[in-house]
Image: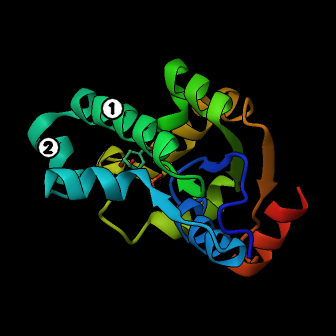
Amino acid sequence: PLAGRLRKTIVMVGMMGAGKTAVGRALAARLGVPFLDSDAEIEAAANMTVPEIFVRDGEPFFRRKESQVIARLLDEARGVLSTGGGAFLAEANRRMISEKGVSVWLNAPVEVLWNRVRHKDSRPLLRTSNPRATLQELYEARKPFYREADLMVLSEGDVSVEQMVDRVLAA
Ligand code: S3P
């Protein structure tokens, strides 16, 4: 185990359904370092789910909380940090993350992302009349930002979480 030996936090970025939480958690376990999750921290602090926060307080409020939580987590602990899919879009967040962490873009074809999120109701941004098209549009609009991550790891549909951990470590 590397516990306490990471020089920088490993920050998972990328779209909803890319596996940031599942791969991040497994990577942290493999390395023996803390696992941190910005969405989970926001939910715990607000005692509400992410969709509830979007409905009650709106997306701009959620984004402010997200920046605060990421700043705090980057300062508090060195481990693996999974962020929400929109976190890497704000320039201030990207700057913080690149100063204090190593960013990993978990990338996957939109079809794969869609198959992972289609049966869930936990993504407020996909509550549109055509969520499949919305996901595609978000992917296209966000790709230029995700490309700024330090590393990119691709997940095709049939790659296991442990195989993804191997790929992140290899990268
Ligand atoms: C969002 C992704 C979600 C969550 C919120 C907004 C986004 O996290 O932060 O619903 O803007 O893509 P996941 O990427 O973990 O689904």
Is there CB contact under 8 Å for labels 1 and 2?
A: no
Query: Which of 87 and 25 lies nearest the eye of the viewer?
Result: 25
Query: Which of 160 and 150 lies nearest the eye of the viewer?
Result: 150
Task: Please give the residue where the numbered disc 1 appears in the rendered image.
Answer: 63
Residue 143: which quarter of the image? top right
Secondary structure state at the residue bearing disc 1: helix
Query: Relative to 61, does residue 3 appear above or below in the rendering?
Result: below
In this rendering, would 3 be left or right of 137? right
Label 1 beta carbon less than 8 Å to ligand 1: no
Coordinates of residue 61 in the picture (x, y in percent) = 22, 30
Query: Which of 10 and 117 lies nearest the eye of the viewer?
Result: 10
Taking the spot 71% from the left edge, 48% from the top edge, the residue there is 104
Coordinates of residue 137 in the picture (x, y in percent) = 54, 36
Secondary structure state at the residue bearing disc 2: helix
At label 1, the amino acid type is Arg
Residue 55: assigned label: 2
Does residue 85 appear in this view?
Answer: yes
In this rendering, would 30 be left or right of 84? right
